Image: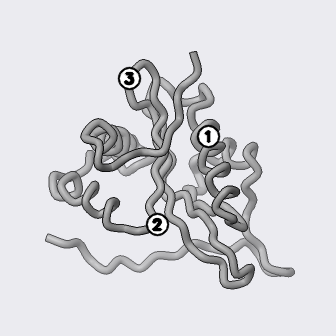
Amino acid sequence: MPVEIRLSDLNSAADAAAVIAVLDSYASDPRGGSEPLSAQVRDRLIPGLKSHPTTRIWLAWDAGQAVGLCVGFLGFSTFQARPLLNIHDLAVVPGRRGGGVGRALLSAAESHARQAGCCKLTLEVLDDNHPARGLYERFGFRDVKHGDSGPMRFLSKNLGNLT
């Protein structure tokens, strides 16, 4: 039986708990930093996602268990004057990786983006995360290049932690 992919309802206690559980699983993994989500992040996560107007989260379910998620945020491409969907997190619980859950989540996000008139999907991935990069490349993601310049870089500036 294939997994069920559906848009989450963050007002549902089951969906909210699933989002936290799957993200915590990813955060605890070496690729996610090897640290579980802090109590403060757990407390702020669902209210923060609910208050952000462009949040889209798809959950993958198998036999009543959440086995993956895709967190996206709608943005806007000024060069194409159309919306875009940035995939901020794609996580599959250990033991279910490599079985098509990530691809199914990406397909659901792409379908939603097409229906919303988005011009593209974007995401960031660690350079040494070869399994994820392989999935994304097979799905059609490529390095961003403008003209003759090299690949675009994703940069960040930390503004500090909230207490």
Pointer 1 local density, CA inside 10 Å: few below 14, some 14–19, many at least 20? few
Q: Would you say 40 lies left or right of 95 here?
A: left
Q: Give the SS element for disc 3.
A: loop
Q: Are marks 3 and 1 in contact (CB under 8 Å)?
A: no
Q: If you read the primary sequence from the N terminus, does the residue marked by circle 2 or circle 3 appear first? A: 2
Q: Percent x, y for residue 44?
A: 22, 60
Q: Which residue type carries mark 2?
A: Thr
Does 163 sit above or below residue 137?
Answer: below
Q: What residue lies at 42% left-to-right and 18% top-to-bottom?
A: 63
Pointer 3 local density, CA inside 10 Å: few below 14, some 14–19, many at least 20? few
Q: Quadrant of residue 115?
A: bottom right
Q: Percent x, y for residue 114?
A: 70, 57
Identify the residue under disc 3: 64
Spatial separation of the CA atoms under disc 1 and disc 2: 28 Å
Q: Which residue type carries mark 3?
A: Gly
Dot label at residue 27 = none
Question: On the rendered image, what quadrant is the N terminus found in?
Answer: top right
Q: Would you say 83 lies left or right of 92 here?
A: right
Identify which residue, 150 or 21, lies in the foreground.
21
Identify the residue under disc 1: 131
Q: Which residue type carries mark 1?
A: Pro
